[in-house]
Image (cartoon, helix red, strand yellow):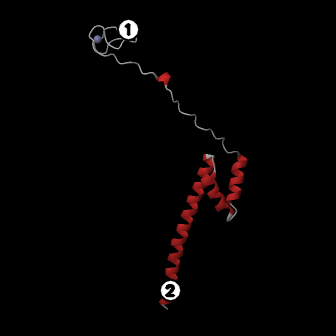
Amino acid sequence: MTCPHCGAPVNDGAKFCQSCGAAVPQAPLYAQSSSPCPPAPVYPHLSVGGYFIMLLLSLIPVVNIVMFFVWAFGSENPSRRNFGRAQLLILLIGVVLCVLFGAALLSLFSLLVSSR
Ligand SMILES: [Zn+2]
């Protein structure tokens, strides 16, 4: 390698340039990393049967809500977990819309009754 300060050739492993005395940057020791990252766990893809059972359970009232919570917070598989969370989100939006429309209909009804 060469000195970054004066460009003179520097011996490998030398800390200072023999020509100008400038400090020579040491090559980073990537290979000697003492704490490598642990490999991320690999989850198998959900099979067609797995999706089939999941969608079938989603169609059963009451059972589906329980299963959504189980999948959303109890499943190790990220695909099943995300499916459960997405379904819970849809459920939440549905409940909010029902409450809003219900309140609107109720106020409309009471308006019609009182105007009579
Ligand atoms: Zn130098």
What residue lies at 70% left-to-right and 45% top-to-bottom? 47
Q: The residue under label 1 is which amino acid type?
A: Asn
Q: Position of residue 62 (x, y in %)?
A: 67, 65
Decide which of 116, 50 is in the foreground and name it: 50
What residue lies at 70% left-to-right and 62% top-to-bottom? 60
What residue lies at 63% left-to-right and 46% top-to-bottom? 77
Is label 2 or label 1 in front? 1
Q: Position of residue 78 (x, y in %)?
A: 60, 46
Judge from the rendering whether residue 46 lies leftward or rightward of residue 104; answer left or right.
right
Q: Which residue is under mark 1? A: 11
Separation (CA) of disc 2 from disc 1: 95 Å
User: How would you rate the neighbour count of disc 1 (Cα within 10 Å): few for under 14, some for 14-19, many for 20 or more?
Assistant: few
Please tell me which of labels 2 and 1 falls first in the chain.
1
Judge from the rendering whether residue 84 lies leftward or rightward of residue 60; answer left or right.
left
Q: Quadrant of residue 25?
A: top left
Q: Quadrant of residue 71?
A: bottom right
Judge from the rendering whether residue 93 lies leftward or rightward of residue 10; answer left or right.
right
* Quadrant of picture, ligand 1: top left
Q: Which residue is under mark 2? A: 112
